[in-house]
C-alpha cells in the first residue's frame, strides 16, 4: 500500500529551511529531499498561499520561512496541504445494498472518525518549534552541530 508522505516531507523541508541562513533554492531543497525541484516548487507554492513561506526571485533568492515556528502546528501544515486523506482504509462500498455491509460501514466509519479526530487534535498540539527542539536535542546527543550531512546520518 502506498502511503502519502507529503506532510512528513513538508515538515522535513521546513526544519531544514529553519536551519539555513537565508533563502534556499528549489534545487537546494530538492537535493535535501532527494526529489525534483519541480516537486518542491509545487509544494512550496501551496505553503506560500498560506503565508508559511515566501519566495524571492533572482540571484540570492529562493524560499524562506515566513511564519512563527512557535505558533504553527502540524495541523496548520496538514490543512495547508489540503487536508489529505489520513487513512488508506475505507469501506468496500459507500452505498451498500446489504444490511450486513451497512452495519460494517457504520462501525468502521465511527472508528475512522474517532481516530481521525484524535490524530488531528494531536497535530494541533505539536508546533514546528517543538519539532525543531527535538531535532536539536538529537544532534546534541550525537555531539554534533547542524549540517546537512550529519542530519541525514542514521
Image (cartoon, rainbow, N blue to C red):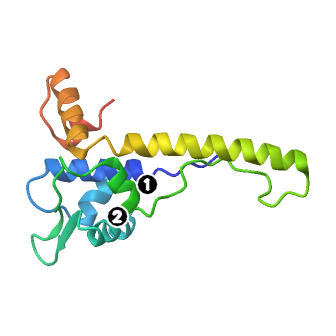
Q: Is residue 139 left or right of residue 42?
A: left
Element type at marker 2?
helix
Q: Which residue is mark 1?
A: 6
Q: Is residue 54 visible?
A: yes
User: In the rendered image, which quarter is residue 153 located in?
Assistant: top left
Element type at marker 1?
helix
Q: Is residue 119 left or right of residue 62?
A: right
Give the residue displayed 9% in from the left and 59% down from the top: 22
Task: Choose between 17 and 30: the one closer to the eye.
Answer: 17
Cα distance in 3D space between marks 2 and 1: 11 Å
Q: Is residue 34 visible?
A: no
Indicate the position of residue 149 as horizontal and vertical percent values: 23, 40
Indicate the position of residue 40 as horizontal and vertical percent values: 34, 64
- Residue farthest to the right? 98
User: In the rendered image, which quarter is residue 62 located in?
Assistant: bottom left
Give the residue displayed 55% in from the left and 55% down from the top: 85
Q: Earlier in the sequence, mark 2 or mark 1?
A: 1
Q: Which residue is mark 2?
A: 40
- From this view, report whether residue 53 is shown above or below residue 125: below
- From this view, report whether residue 130 is shown above or below residue 34: above
Mark 1, Cα crowd under 10 Å, few <14 / some 14-19 / many 20+, is few
- From this view, report whether residue 57 is shown above or below residue 150: below
Give the residue displayed 41% in from the left and 61% down from the top: 81
Amino acid at each position: 500500500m502506498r502511503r502519502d508522505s507529503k506532510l512528513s516531507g513538508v515538515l522535513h523541508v521546513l526544519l531544514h529551511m529553519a536551519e539555513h541562513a537565508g533563502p534556499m533554492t528549489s534545487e537546494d531543497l530538492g537535493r535535501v529531499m532527494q526529489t525534483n525541484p519541480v516537486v518542491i516548487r509545487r509544494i512550496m507554492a501551496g505553503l506560500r498561499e498560506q503565508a508559511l513561506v515566501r519566495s524571492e526571485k533572482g540571484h540570492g533568492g529562493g524560499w524562506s520561512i515566513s511564519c512563527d515556528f512557535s505558533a504553527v502546528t502540524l495541523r496548520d501544515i496538514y490543512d495547508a496541504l489540503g487536508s489529505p486523506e489520513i487513512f488508506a482504509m475505507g469501506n468496500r462500498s459507500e452505498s451498500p445494498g446489504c444490511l450486513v455491509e451497512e452495519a460494517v460501514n457504520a462501525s468502521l466509519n465511527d472508528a475512522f472518525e474517532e481516530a481521525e479526530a484524535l490524530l488531528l487534535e494531536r497535530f494541533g498540539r505539536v508546533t514546528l518549534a517543538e519539532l525543531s527542539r527535538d531535532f536539536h536535542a538529537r544532534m546534541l546527543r550525537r555531539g554534533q552541530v547542524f549540517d546537512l550531512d550529519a542530519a541525514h546520518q542514521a
